[in-house]
Amino acid sequence: MSDVLIRQTGHLGHVTLNRPKAINALTHGMVRDIHSALLTWKDDPSVTVILIDGEGERGFCAGGDIAAIYQSARSHDGTAAQFWREEYPLNALISRYPKPYVALMHGIVMGGGVGLSAHGLFRIVTGTSRIAMPEVGIGFVPDVGGLHLLSRAPGELGAYLGLTGAPMKAVDAILCGFADCCVNAEFLPQVIQNIAECHRAEDVAAAIRSVASAPPPGELADKRAWIDACFRHESIEDILAALDAHSNADAHATAAIIRKQSPTSLKVTLRGLRSARSQSLAECLKMEFRMAVATTLHHDLAEGIRAAVIDKDRQPKWRPATLDDVSPALVASHFAAPAGGDLDLPE
């Protein structure tokens, strides 16, 4: 079976990620196949709606193929950069797709899965959805337009999510602009059936509303006060100091989580988050491409993946090991044009 199933049912162009044992982790070939299908359907009058989902109950997509990125980061062979050079234009295409694009974001949705779903016109979550951008925990940075989304979340919720990698439940994802509505998982087949003969975005919206339900309770709304107070600062050091000084026990636990992340990734991510506030999605993707390629040239990405996925000892040895040792020059290097050239992406 193919890693991605592409077919037309009625007026519906249907894409299913088909690597359930890997929680549908995204390979280079899958990116190319999805991009090709979307370009074909864009000009096909018989296709009026696009839907993307993932095979299996564990989740829509756990992100990019981490094993391939690990090998590229170790060998510096440029294959990860080429993957992102093709993945990010797909994310941009989804954001401006001329036909209704519906994403079923069930279960785990991380990293590259966010890029395939959260830029679409209709983003549907379920009670099982857990959406996250956990990249700082493996020495990477939020990408696929994740910084663009995070920077537009209410208050400082985006900074909190980007610097901790904390997962969002359904209602949290809706609050933060990563999703639009919640549908009970048992009604997802009904969603597909309902939209298969839709022609207009208004019809799709009505079809989804007919089976939508109130999402289960979340966590972020109740945390807004201390998150906004502590994450408004412009340096990781000041954010940690504010968390340490706060009276809320959750703030102290959050500080402990942040201190486990890659110091370099933390500083680069915070700078990227602040920059993304004033950027279009295309501008943000270009910045993220620079950031992502730079991580493959430094120690922490390969080390972070090793500790989390390869050896699974959960004991990464970051280099530099402390925030104090992360120089301004090292941070700046993540925002410089890569040797292979910038991402070619129209505004």
Image (cartoon, rainbow, N blue to C red):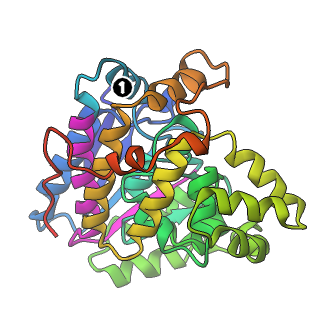
Question: Relative to the observer, which residue lies in front, 36 or 309?
Answer: 309
How packed is label 1: few (under 14 Cα within 10 Å), some, or many (20 or more)?
many
Indicate left or right for 209 with 130 as reference. left
- Residue at numbered disc 1: 73
Kindly tell me whether residue 228 is visible in this rendering. yes
Q: Residue furthest top?
A: 311
Q: Residue furthest left?
A: 43
Give the residue drawn at x 51%, y 35%.
23
Residue 6: x and y in percent read 26, 44
Residue 65: x and y in percent read 40, 31
Kindly tell me whether residue 123 is visible in this rendering. no
Give the residue drawn at x 24%, y 28%.
79
Q: Quadrant of residue 321?
A: top right
Q: Quadrant of residue 49?
A: bottom left
- The residues colored magenta run 81-106
Residue 32: x and y in percent read 20, 40
Amino acid under disc 1:
Ala
**Quick one: SS at disc 1?**
helix
Question: Relative to the observer, which residue lies in front, 252 or 94?
Answer: 252
Q: Can you say whether 105 is above or below 211 in the image?
A: above
Give the residue drawn at x 57%, y 52%.
132
Quadrant (top left, top right, bottom left, bottom right) of the N terminus? top left
Give the residue drawn at x 77%, y 70%.
223
Indicate left or right for 289 with 331 as reference. left
Residue 322: x and y in percent read 62, 38
